[in-house]
Amino acid sequence: MTQENDKKQDEMTLSQEARQLVAANRRGVLSTLLPQDGYPYASMVDYAPLPDGDVIMFLSRLAEHQKYLTADPRVSLLIAPNIMANNALAEARISLVGRVELARDRRAMAEIYLQYHPQARQYINFGDFQFYRLRVERARYIAGFGRMGWLTDGRYHQN
């Protein structure tokens, strides 16, 4: 029983750390699927974290990734703030996996997004940009060497 409790406690700790990493950062690598053959396509995007752990992105219809996620909403978002560090593989990172949906309440999303990306104020009202919410279904969190795990079955969203 103690071993099972320890495992649950470590999963909860990983979940909390993962959510903190997402909340503390603002940019990641979004991978969408090419409609013609299903290959992954990666591009850099800015995001704003939501209190429940999901994220919102403000994407232009002119961007390739926006076209691809419209065709297939399955995506992953890699957040690796120390990607350029010499010891990057020993640093924390997360891949959020889920589906993206068009966020309907533009005003509320803009208010949240501008808190994290005030420079977006200059194009926040452009008609070719839309807000998308990544609904996280699972996450792969790597805290560093030897501490990692999949956060599935709603554990990523648990406090």
Image (spheres, helix red, strand yellow):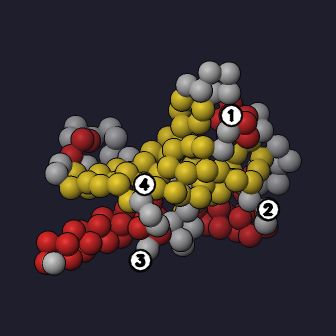
Whether pointer 2 and pointer 4 mark residues with C-beta atoms closer than 8 Å, the reply is no
Look at label 2 and name its amino acid. Answer: Arg
Between discs 1 and 4, the one toward the N terminus = 1
**What's the residue at 45%, 45% (across, down)?**
78
Q: Position of residue 136 (x, y in %)?
A: 53, 57
Look at label 4 and name its amino acid. Answer: Ala
Residue density around tag 4, few if under 14, some if 14–19, many if 20 or more, within 10 Å:
many
Q: Position of residue 132 (x, y in %)?
A: 69, 53
Closer to the camera, 145 or 11?
11
Residue density around tag 1, few if under 14, some if 14–19, many if 20 or more, within 10 Å:
many
In the displayed structure, does residue 64 sit left or right of residue 139?
Answer: right
Real-space Cα separation, disc 4 to disc 3, in angstroms: 15 Å
Closer to the camera, 63 or 101?
101
- Kindly indicate the quadrant of the structure image that contains residue 109: bottom right
Residue picked out by circle 3: 159
Q: Is residue 143 visible?
A: yes
Residue picked out by circle 2: 104
Image quadrant where one finds the N terminus: bottom left
Query: What label sits on residue 68 in the rendered view?
Result: 1
Question: What is the residue that sits farthest to the left in this orientation?
Answer: 2
**What's the residue at 22%, 37% (across, down)?**
86
Residue picked out by circle 4: 139
Real-space Cα separation, disc 1 to disc 4, in angstroms: 21 Å
